[in-house]
Image: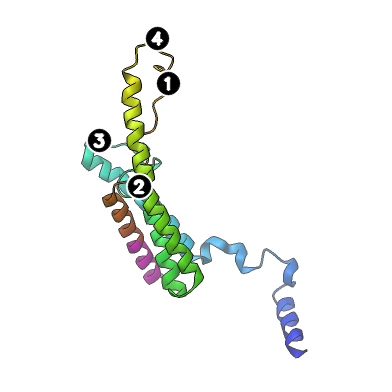
Amino acid sequence: MNEVMMAADASSMRGGGATSFASSPSSNLLPNNLPLLTAFLAFALAQFLKLFTNWFKERRWDSKRMIDSGGMPSSHSATVTALAVAIGLQDGMGGPAFAIAVVLACVVMYDASGVRLHAGRQAELLNQIVCEFPPEHPLSSVRPLRELLGHTPLQVVAGALVGFIVAFLMRNSG
């Protein structure tokens, strides 16, 4: 009975218990959630790095690379790797949250370097076929398919490396 009374007293001291949602720790989701912040930062950094890798590859600046999918490094891989590593560093590697994050990371990275990469290659071939149609063909004026969808294994590994680095730096800075 005393335990129940102490729990009720504690919630009333915080400012009203369940009726005060604004004062609960979950209302400050972003500032207090290191794994979430780490994942967002890794995503943003990977997208920003695409500007420079694109410049080295094509010798031109293309700001659209900041919002496009595909390219070096993989921002998807950076995001899920940073999330998994940050959860592992914060909560340990034995919990269910870490297991879920690792499985998610594996699925996302496999998809990026497998299914999406090959879908982009098929889009490239289909675009070439459509370009060879005569102008009077009904499909000759169809908008081209997006070709840069997936990632090479090197791009996926580079993204994962960005995620690891961001997670370790965020953990050490906080």
3D distance between C-alphas at marks 3 and 4: 36 Å
Look at discs 3 and 4 and give the one toward the viewer.
4
Q: Which residue reaches farthest bottom? A: 2
Which label sits on residue 114?
Answer: 2
Element class at badge 2 = loop
- Tell me the amino acid under the disc marked 4: Glu
Sequence-first tag of 3 and 4: 3
Look at discs 2 and 1 and give the one toward the viewer.
2
- Tell me the amino acid under the disc marked 1: Val
Q: How dense is the environment of label 4, judged by Cα within 10 Å: few (below 14), some, or many (20 and up)?
A: few
Sequence-first tag of 2 and 3: 3
Q: Which residue is mark 1?
A: 142
Q: How dense is the environment of label 1, judged by Cα within 10 Å: few (below 14), some, or many (20 and up)?
A: few
3D distance between C-alphas at marks 2 and 3: 28 Å
Pointers 2 and 1 in contact (CB under 8 A)?
A: no
Q: Which residue is mark 4?
A: 136
Which label sits on residue 60?
Answer: 3
Pointers 2 and 3 in contact (CB under 8 A)?
A: no
Sequence-first tag of 1 and 4: 4
Is residue 165 one of those drawn in magenta?
A: yes
Residue 12 shows up from this direction = yes
Sequence-first tag of 2 and 4: 2
Say above or below: 129 vs 153. above
What residue is shown at x 42% (from left), y 21% (from top)?
142
Quadrant of the drawing holding the N terminus: bottom right
- Tell me the amino acid under the disc marked 3: Arg
What residue is shown at x 73% (from left), y 87% (from top)?
3
Say above or below: 129 vs 26. above
Element class at badge 4 = loop
Sequence-first tag of 2 and 1: 2
What residue is shown at x 37% (from left), y 53% (from top)?
109
Element class at badge 1 = loop
